[in-house]
Image (cartoon, helix red, strand yellow):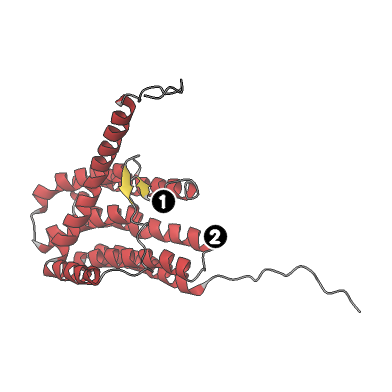
Amino acid sequence: MDNEPTEIKRRRGIYLLPNLFTTGCLFAGFYAIVAAMNGRYEPAAIAIFVAMVMDSLDGRVARLTNTQSDFGAQYDSLADMVSFGLAPGLIMYTWALSGMGKLGWLAAFVYTACAALRLARFNTQVGTADKRYFQGLPSPAAAAVVTGMMWVGHDFNADLTYLRVPAFVLTVVIGLLMVSTLRYHSFKDLDLRGKVPFVAVLIIMLVYAFISIDPPQVLFGAFLMYAISGPLLSLKYRREKRAARKTPEGPDDSSGKTP
């Protein structure tokens, strides 16, 4: 009788379900670029937020279905670069920064380059970083702030003459926050599979209702506060660490004497 092979060949292929969400994220980012180039800024902004939803789902679906793979991780990073790095920079440039000449496209490039550096650093720290916190502003949140400002300004038909400088400053600052060492809550410690109180479902419904009142202002305000929370959280952490160093140590009981 012939000896049967002892090694099982590894099946080639990719997992379909999580990569479908990643492809949706990539498509939404590409659509946002095309829409902005055609002057359709509201659909462009909506597409970026749709990309955020897709990006949040692909990783969770992969973990829930145990379909994580190296290919999926790299594909997700490339999709994030398009949707949260390239697309917001181009959207902001076509909307407000193009009127500033070289300074405008330099600001858009700084944002895009910082997003690329942020994603590259994240990929190299996946196994060592504290999962409770992000180092630097996450690229989806950065994209939400930049795109949210454009959405609010377009919704109010604001005069771009007065918004070019604020748009320039916001684009550069948000880009630098991505490559900073500031700490941001990742919210990865939330257990979505466990049971929650009934009031949690009610709160989620109220959040949806609050967003529906004025999506541009609510979303922009929420993600802007999240961007500001990074410096505040880092400042609090440094103060606590400094206070712990200054705290005097207790009496030395090494002698073994009882009081």
* Image position, residue 155 (x, y; %): 12, 63
The three-letter code of the residue at mark 2 reads Asp
User: Residue 123: x percent and y percent?
Assistant: 47, 50
Q: CA distance from mark 1 to mark 2?
A: 19 Å
Q: Earlier in the sequence, mark 1 or mark 2?
A: 2
Front residue of this view, candidates 250 and 123: 250
Q: Is residue 146 above or below residue 212?
A: above
Determine whether 172 is above or below 89 in the image: above
Q: Is residue 126 above or below residue 1?
A: above
The residue wearing badge 2 is 70
Quadrant for residue 106, please give it: top left
Q: Which mark is residue 131?
A: 1
Q: Nearer the viewer, residue 160 or 148?
A: 148
Which amino acid type is marked by label 1? Lys
Q: Is residue 43 left or right of residue 114?
A: left
Query: Residue 204 sits in which quadrant?
Result: bottom left
Residue at 54 percent across and 60 percent down: it is: 70
The quarter in which the N terminus is drawn is bottom right
The residue at the far bottom in this view is 1
* Residue 136 location (% of width, % of height): 34, 45
Mark 1 in CB contact with mark 2 (< 8 angstroms) = no
Q: Residue lying farthest front?
A: 258
The answer to whether residue 38 is seen in the rendering is no
Q: Secondary structure at mark 1?
A: loop
Q: Position of residue 211 (x, y in %)?
A: 16, 67
Q: Nearer the viewer, mark 1 or mark 2?
A: 1
The residue positioned 49% from the left and 47% from the top of the image is 124
- Residue 49 in view of the camera: yes
Helix, strand or loop at label 2? It is helix
